[in-house]
Amino acid sequence: MSNMLMWEKTVIGLCKLAYRQHYRCEDCWYSCGAADSCDDSKGGKCTCGADDHNTILLGVFTDCYADHGIFDVSVIAEAWETVKKENDDG
């Protein structure tokens, strides 16, 4: 396995472990505004902290790997978007 492929798999794995989904509850009143909330006062905005958490972690991953020199940090952004789509569509 090439170093590039190994690092990409590592980054994707870290993204999967770190990514936080929006809170969904059986009673939609308590769900995050960015999820399935039936509380219109939330305005479709994140109220569970997942957006803040994910933004901070994406920054940490990018900062950690930016100077590493093994791959372009766009790999992190692509991995993060893939994980985000996998989690938010479900």
Image (spheres, helix red, strand yellow):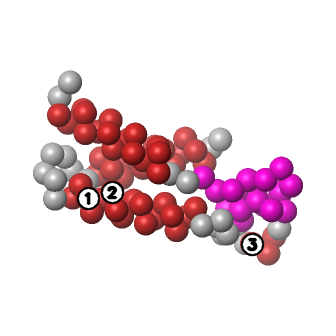
Percent position of residue 78, x then y: 37, 47
- State the SS at label 1: helix
Residue found 20% across the figure and 36% down from its top: 4
The mark that comes first in sequence, 2 or 3, is 3
Give the farthest residue toward the top.
1
Prevalent SS, magenta region: loop
Taking the magenta stretch, the answer to whether it contains residue 81 is no
Residue 37, by quadrant, is: bottom right
Q: In the image, 46: left or right of 42?
A: left
Graded by Cα atoms within 10 Å as few (under 14), some (14 to 19) or many (20 or more), the crowding at tag 2 reads some
Taking the magenta stretch, the answer to whether it contains residue 31 is yes
The residue beneath circle 1 is: 64
Q: For the residue marked with disc 2, what is the amino acid?
A: Phe
Percent position of residue 11, x then y: 33, 44
Q: Assign the N terminus to one quadrant of the image.
A: top left
The residue beneath circle 3 is: 42
Q: What is the tally of numbered marks visible in this picture?
A: 3
- State the SS at label 3: helix
Q: CA distance from mark 3 to mark 1?
A: 34 Å
Q: Which residues are magenta?
A: 21-37
Q: Quick check: marks 1 and 2 in contact, CB under 8 Å?
A: yes
Q: CA distance from mark 1 to mark 2?
A: 5 Å
Q: Which mark is residue 61?
A: 2
